[in-house]
Amino acid sequence: MQPVTALTIAGSDSGGGAGIQADLRTFSAFGVHGTSAITAVTAQNTRGVAAVHQIPVDDVEAQIRAVIEDFDVRAFKTGMLAQPRTVERVADMKRAGLLGPLVVDPVLVSTSGDSLMIDGGVEAYRDALLPLCDLATPNLHEAALLCGVAIGDIHTPEDMAAL
């Protein structure tokens, strides 16, 4: 029996703690065949992000198309999309019916606090991609940014749920 195939669309973390590397490990742990489309290459470790190289949006789309033309991808997950144009292109592909069930992790800031999205990313997620996803997994800081709420205004689980 063939394992289920999933596609992660995310950045590469040179430290291996997040991004494509972590997604593929997670897929494997659950017996899922992992495929990937890399949106950015980062130079980072546990202390911070030293550099981010964004992959051109047409190249990201080419990676996605190469995978979906050959594999029966049953689930899609996004991570660091790095630029608004990539967020919008993924949304366009979802609207066109090219992407199935979609989990969106709107990665905006690294664990060390470094920005992983250029200006306009919050709006692109909020307006283009989040309305199309099947599940969104923002952390508290990302949820606050996406909802335009100051993190200091969130004190209880009920405050978070209200977002």
Image (spheres, rainbow, N blue to C red):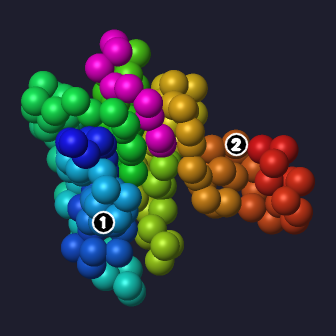
The x, y position of residue 6, in whole percent, is 30, 43
Above or below: residue 90 compared with residue 143: above
Q: Nearer the viewer, residue 92 or 24?
A: 24
The x, y position of residue 79, in whole percent, is 39, 51
In the rendered image, which quarter contains the C terminus? top right
Q: Earlier in the sequence, mark 1 or mark 2?
A: 1
Q: How far apart are the two marked residues, 1 and 2, measured between alpha carbons?
A: 31 Å
Would you identify the image quadrant in which residue 154 lies? bottom right
**Quick one: label 1, few (<14), some, or many (20+) residues within 10 Å?**
some
Magenta-colored stretch includes residue 127:
no
- Dots 1, 2 in contact, CB < 8 A: no
Magenta region: 96-104
Secondary structure under badge 2? helix
User: Does residue 23 show up?
Assistant: no
| Disc 1 target residue | 25
Would you identify the image quadrant in which residue 4 lies? top left
Residue at 54%, 32% (x, y): give it: 134
Residue 147's mark?
A: 2
Give amino acid for label 1. Arg
| Left or right relative to 35: residue 102 | right
Q: What secondary structure predominates along the stretch shown in magenta?
A: loop
In the rendered image, which quarter contains the N terminus? top left
